[in-house]
Image (spheres, rainbow, N blue to C red):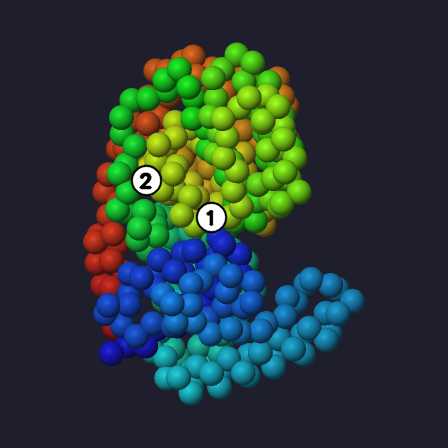
Amino acid sequence: MKKILIVTGGSGGHVIPSLSIYDILKDNFEVQIATDLRGSKYINNNDYNYSLIDVPNLFSNFLLLPFNLIKFCISILKSYKYLKLNNYNTLISTGGYMSLPLCLASNLLSIKTYIFEPNSVIGRANKLTLSFAKKVICYDKNLKGISKKFLSKVYPINPLLRKEIYKYQRNEKTILDKQKKILVIGGSQGAKFFDEFISKTIIKLSKTQNISILQQVSDQKSKEFIKDLYQKNSIEHELFDFDDKLLIKAVNYDLAITRSGASAISELAYLNIPFVAIPFPYAKDNHQYYNAEFYEKNKCCWLITQNDIDENNFIDLMNKIFENKNEYFSKKKNLIELTKENTWEKNKFKMIELINEN
């Protein structure tokens, strides 16, 4: 049986896809995940086999660059030893700086290496792996940031979601009743901007609309502040920190206001929940903007940049969505059409077929 190592960075955007890859391959191969301490908080010890790898971030502090460079080289040597000792046949990288030493070591050992890129722009770590990777598994066949000589390596699949998402009842009924049910998602790290701007805007919006809100908050202090704000204005609400079971509740919501991490908007799309995307403006290579742009071009969402947003135009947009139901239902219909071919079984077949290629 082939032994596969899935290497992932420490953010939710890297780890969550790695868990889906693990689940889709575990019945056919011996699978292990390697991540750092940051990534481990997203992994349930009872469900996944994983190892912790300590890799320095080369560019976190330029004064420490020489020291970190030495540590990075040591990490490559340790990775070489780790891969050889465990006799892996295949390595799959979902990106992040901690994946680089293992990817470089896999090349030295001639281990078959694949890149898994859920974003519409290839990440920097994955980009450095391109020259020796066999394929780039991605959701967007027009993946940005990849040179022409590597285009033949692009292997598009439907967005690979968490397995439990495929079991949910998809939101296909026509809604937008008198009470508007809004979901607010700031990403795996939460979003301070959403805590402050969105919450205050919801208060103003509630003067003319009956609103129920399910909102992610970035920390306990913000949670208490927003809770008090909504209670004073008699807004039905539920607040939460990062919750990987969130979408069980989200299925019953009309509309999402969200950042544009690949996993979050792919899951919203699959569940047929139209969304307003406000990409994180400081994301590397502006990948969140391009993630959202893919859905906007398919007429499935509304896209507004954080730099262009203010209270007035955002309230105008929300009122337009609630009042122009034809546009809302058109986007829902487009989501249903866009995601109808996305099944766990089809993605599993494509992934296993790829891994088994010589």
Pick the front one: 312 or 194: 194
Q: Is 147 in front, or is 349?
A: 349
Front: mark 2 or 1? 1
Horizontal relation, residue 122 to residue 138: left or right: right
Residue 257 - label: none
Q: Which quadrant is the N terminus positioned in?
A: bottom left
Alpha-carbon span between mark 2 and mark 1? 18 Å
Q: Earlier in the sequence, mark 2 or mark 1?
A: 1
Q: Which residue is mark 2?
A: 270
> Which residue lies under the disc numbered 1?
243
- Tell me residue 161's x, y (percent): 34, 50
Q: Secondary structure at mark 1?
A: loop
Q: Amino acid at mark 2?
A: Tyr
Circle 2 crowding by C-alpha within 10 Å: few under 14, some 14–19, many from 20: many
Crowd rating for badge 1 (residues with CA inside 10 Å; few <14, some 14–19, many 20+): few
Q: How many marks?
A: 2
Task: Inspect this view and state whether residue 333 appears.
Answer: yes
